[in-house]
Image: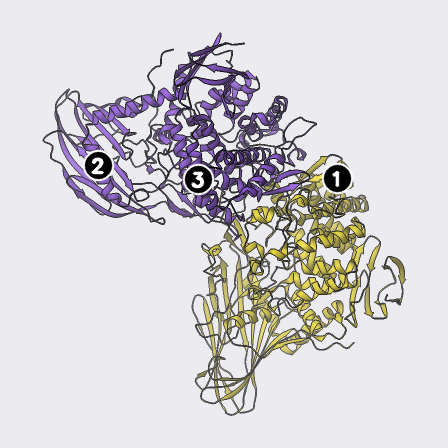
Chain colours: A purple, B yellow
Amino acid sequence: MKQRPRIYEVTDFVLDNYHIQLHETLFHNANGYIGLRYDFEEGYPEEYEPITSQYINGFYDYAPIPQPENLYGLVREKQLMPDIANTQTIRLSIDNESFSLFTGTVLKLRLSLDMDRGVTLRHVHWRSPKGHEVVIDITRMASFHQLSLFTIEYAITPLNFSGTARVESGHDVDVENYYDPSDPRNANEQARHIHPLNCEIRDETSYITAVTSKSGLEVTSCVQHLLPEGTQPEFWGNHQATLTRFDLELKESQTVTFVKYAVFADSLRHDNPKNHAAEEMVKAMTIPLSELYLKQEEYLEQYWKNCLVEIDGDDEANLALSYNLYQLIQSAGKDSFSNIATKGLSGEGYEGQYFWDTEIYIQPFFTVTNPAISRQLIGYRYHTLDMARENARILGHPKGALYPWRTITGREASGFFPAGSAQYHINADIAYAIIAYYLATNDLDLVLLEGAEIILETARIWLSTGNFTDGHFNLYGVTGPDEYTCLVNNNYYTNVMAKYHLEWAVTFHELLRKNPAYEAMMERIELGETEIESFRLAALEMLLPYDRQLNINPQDDAFLKKPLWNKEEIPKENYPLLLHYHPLHLYRHQICKQADTVLAHFLLEDAQPEDVMKDSFNYYARITTHDSSLSRSIFSIMAARLGMEDEALEYFGDSIKLDLMDLQHNTKDGIHTANMAGNYLAIVYGFAGLRLKVSGLSLRPMLPASWRGYRFNLRYRDSRLCIEVDQKNCTITLVEGSPKTIRVHDETCHLEDSLVFPMK
Amino acid sequence: MKQRPRIYEVTDFVLDNYHIQLHETLFHNANGYIGLRYDFEEGYPEEYEPITSQYINGFYDYAPIPQPENLYGLVREKQLMPDIANTQTIRLSIDNESFSLFTGTVLKLRLSLDMDRGVTLRHVHWRSPKGHEVVIDITRMASFHQLSLFTIEYAITPLNFSGTARVESGHDVDVENYYDPSDPRNANEQARHIHPLNCEIRDETSYITAVTSKSGLEVTSCVQHLLPEGTQPEFWGNHQATLTRFDLELKESQTVTFVKYAVFADSLRHDNPKNHAAEEMVKAMTIPLSELYLKQEEYLEQYWKNCLVEIDGDDEANLALSYNLYQLIQSAGKDSFSNIATKGLSGEGYEGQYFWDTEIYIQPFFTVTNPAISRQLIGYRYHTLDMARENARILGHPKGALYPWRTITGREASGFFPAGSAQYHINADIAYAIIAYYLATNDLDLVLLEGAEIILETARIWLSTGNFTDGHFNLYGVTGPDEYTCLVNNNYYTNVMAKYHLEWAVTFHELLRKNPAYEAMMERIELGETEIESFRLAALEMLLPYDRQLNINPQDDAFLKKPLWNKEEIPKENYPLLLHYHPLHLYRHQICKQADTVLAHFLLEDAQPEDVMKDSFNYYARITTHDSSLSRSIFSIMAARLGMEDEALEYFGDSIKLDLMDLQHNTKDGIHTANMAGNYLAIVYGFAGLRLKVSGLSLRPMLPASWRGYRFNLRYRDSRLCIEVDQKNCTITLVEGSPKTIRVHDETCHLEDSLVFPMK
């Protein structure tokens, strides 16, 4: 198989609000630090409503969370990702005619995302009202090499005239977060989150420093232009905006190019963001743009090599897969101040907050392709461990740490606790991701430095969330992943994940107990052998609900008693149910928003015999609405695991283009990062059956009958593997690194060079 | 025993904010329609913060309920009781010295509430800064005879001078509801709820009509004065206020008196409130005030006769009891637009809303003393049945009616549904009150006209809240009375009450099935024999949780598994727990805010053997914090029922002066009506063991060893009974009406004249 260029492009679309907002998301530029929605530099006529925004990952303001009653500990303030300075504006007029896609004639328009080069491109062939024809090519990049940097390369080619182009390039903080005023949730929302502190033009460079409304954080944006020789720019500015104006001489058929550089620096990461921005601008300008492009390409070449995944002969699916994986590297925070927002850096849905999506949906991808990024994401959780400790105190736990359900800074930002803070499984999810990282990399240093402390502190919460009764350890009053059933006892997912979490707390303790740094940490957190023993016992006796008659794991103690709700009886227009039924009605029926027990079976398949997982799958398949975008990929994985090929393929096909096709009608609010990773998981953990266990990496490859084959690369410890599956064989090649023992279809194999398994 | 005058008075107190606000509540005047907090007519210096307010029962405005998330069906608007026009102001100056308790010298000050006459009195002996001594006696009345009417009789007696008194009597709608700006709950609260529409002085009468902010209701207040002959009043007015000014000639040692009449009319009850107010004023002024006083006294004489209850020799307790019962008749709505707010008409706590307190705590008092009031309260529920139907639809029930947890108009006004709307027991509570009314009065007409429809429609909810599983009918996802455990399955209280409710739905059906009016109603609500049969079956198979090992009824399916929380370990300053622990922490422990299973045992004692009730009592006594004022009286009743005299007395003694002593430090926000009724219940249903059953009225009298005796009157069907208990005997006298069969200590007795039972 030959890799085709990874380019996603659109040419044929109506220039309406819907497409403007959709493309702002789909073509956004981001690198894990900055993210800029894709806007036309020249702007839009007044009647359009673009959601022009740009963001910094981990940068936050506060906003109130209204509460109907004054109960103790309710969260009254959230963090959100504020819109920062707009550096995208470039207004062009040619011989006094303003360039706009909404005047004159657009003879050609192409938006494209080149995922090998890491740039977006807009190619426009435009005829002005007076008949001037011009080709404009705009290349935008959020640099992976220099995270603070965003560039716009702007090329103008006059086709049938010579003349003058006047350019006005803007930079301003007159920006507001997006909100829909018709939504009653937004009644008290304040949209303007940053305010100008200082606006200055110095050495042909524009600096604007702004401060957030409530968090008091500062951000400096800095803009400079690289212009053709001899160009004389003029500068204007007020307290919150600057304008750089210059004229370019146009000669028929000759391309004139200029570059707009923007860098961003924030006070979360730098004591003096203005100075830092200035340094970053110098750094950016000292390298030719072509070299920056090259570095971008090199970075992505490595990325694609690590995370290659292809379905043989299905170019469309492969492009969608590439698109999804590209968004993940665009979204992933690259330092301990940031993580992966549910919408990446592409929009304001879920307010730029981080959820369990990272650990359970996205890290399983990074851990086996780019473990350094998983390492970084664990670092973010370690960085916020103290706030998880505070959160645990608020919730009444005398010891330990409880991570918040949704957050930017590490503080809880979920307002309705029954479906938010009560999702205690977040603790086990984080532990699971650390354990998986350890199993994939053997990196005990990370465990020693950060992982063990997280795992031990979070494990403590289980002991004060439940008790030993009737010979079992029970967990009370928690909510599992399925938000259509809240505040339950012994949620299977939570319990089995907590059991695994507690077991590994003990395992890591045994691995590290003699290490002086570990001992010092244990002393610091005042955790001794007695508690370790209680972890061991709670894990051993953890109740895992099982119903003998149905041969399934009930979602919780009471779930199976409740009335079944026949999905077939629900009118189509009533989906998603959460918008049409009162929570109490949902809670008291057997109806699921998303994979819950089925997700537990994927993550911890050894906890149950295969027939229990299969009967459970069939049971929950009938009552799961997949109203969450986190659901179908898990059902696909488990269908594959249980040999239900058709179902696996059906669940898989549903979601791979969720954003490209805007299947949930909300891509304008941002991409669905967890779903994007879920597609990868459905192939690698689903069809290929990858698992990470103490016994090592294991595979259970299958090939859907309608596929010719597929292949993917993996990183595993010091090695790089390539797995190729076709109708005849599964070939596993050790591309790099030392020989490995792996398991394939439950057989232990020694991988030295390559192994070939015939497909059944 | 001789009844002493029922007068509560205070003389010795500091004139500080605390006492001003406390007395505003304790001495408020109300009659079930209007309520006026007790304020000094002459006002207060600026640095004081009186909560001057007056209200109309059932009159409402809307205010938003903020919600943290946009879940379907969450309540986003509440009703509240707005402050209406202030007619209390009377400024007096004597020879240019303003009368004020905060200047000059207060030689004597007495506030009193005369519960036989139905008036409050303020007696002041004041020496002005210049040395003028004057006695001022102010008598206020909210008339039970004419509900729209409030009078202030103002008498001035100069002791050591003759001169001129200038009086300025005010009337205005420049009023705001009270809120504490430091309370974060009030951040978005709007305090001004009524706005002037029309302000007019006509025929020496002041009319102000105002409209509410959001509900669009109008209220007219009308003020007129009765002045000594020859007095020439002058009038001023603007858009929202009027002033009546007149001079009175004072002669040493001679008392001069004038009367200020105020009437109120609202558009909820009258199409043209202004016209109605004018008519009401004419009506009030045509009767001499002395006759109005007489009618007030007659009304109360009847009231006290009906609800007499006395502890022999404990004058202090008797006075407190009288005080409490007086507040109940002041608070009880007298038409179908109104009910009994948790704070009566004395303050804005709980926003003037109605809860289950009426049916479970207050109606058991009225039903056996003033059944016509119970009848009226049932009428209110019938009046709002359509809104209960709407509420049921919002919560996903295809048929039936679900009453709101808190309301004025009948619409749900509780914002946090797990501790609000989820308290489905409200339906059974209302049914229980109707059944008790029927058992006490034999009034089948009420059942036919209103009761049956309420009971059948609300019974339907149970069928769609649960299902038949494992041979039982189970109820899921409800919250019982105890708000420290929310969203549970098979709450014992809810289940046993629902069982009783369903049984009576069937019983009433059998009693009325041949009645044409009943048949027409059944056709209208489309309820047939099949549903009646499902009621019968659900009642028969209703699961009543029972734990064999502990021999108790567990509060719900999961309650006993949860960790016990030792009350002794909780620091005193952490009470009430809801202000110091996160709901999740409370929910997952065995800890109760208030009587829940124990309340069920009181209401339905035949559902369990005595030993189960006793073991349950002892179990729950250890884990109940009584953080709700609805709790102790129930524990007192059940302790008495189970022969635990000391406990019964201890629980009783704790709460009888809850408001008079301001034990909960919030009497300024209003009286605690349910607790007040609870004291009555603790004697009559507790020590005397009154129950109403199909088998008739039953008693189980006991006498605490430290008491000499007690007596009380009862209304039962067409009879009036007097029960007297002393150390020797319990004497039951038929004071009025036909002979009755009653049960005493489980023995059936025929009461023709009187019965004497020796006390054990």
Q: Residue at x 48, y 15 (%)?
A: A750
Query: Is A180 or A223 nearer to us in this picture?
Result: A223
Q: Is residue A451 left or right of residue B355?
A: left
Query: Residue A371: which quarter of the image?
Result: top left
Q: Is residue B356 left or right of residue A512?
A: right
What whole-number distance in Å separates the C-alpha atoms at marks 3 and 1? Answer: 65 Å
Query: Is A233 or A183 nearer to us in this picture?
Result: A233
**Mark 1: amino acid:** Ala
Q: Nearer the viewer, mark 1 or mark 2?
A: 2
Disc 3 residue crowd, few under 14, some 14–19, many 20+, Cα 10 Å: few
Q: Position of residue A120 (x, y in %)?
A: 29, 26
Q: Disc 3 is attached to a residue of which chain? A: A
Is residue A632 depicted above or below A755 in this figure?
below
On whether disc 2 and disc 3 are found on a single subunit, the reply is: yes
Query: Is B343 or A526 nearer to us in this picture?
Result: A526
What residue is pinned by disc 3?
A: A516
Q: Secondary structure at mark 3?
A: helix
Q: Disc 2 is attached to a residue of which chain? A: A
Q: How many marks?
A: 3
Is residue A707 depicted above or below B221 in this figure?
above
What residue is pinned by disc 1?
A: B538
What whole-number distance in Å separates the C-alpha atoms at marks 1 and 2? Answer: 75 Å
Q: Position of residue B617 (x, y in %)?
A: 73, 54
Is residue A63 depicted above or below B729 in this figure?
above
Q: Determine whether label 2 and label 3 are within 8 Å by CB.
A: no
**Mark 3: amino acid:** Pro
Q: Position of residue B245 (x, y in %)?
A: 47, 78
Q: Position of residue A341 (x, y in %)?
A: 41, 35
What residue is pinned by disc 2?
A: A281
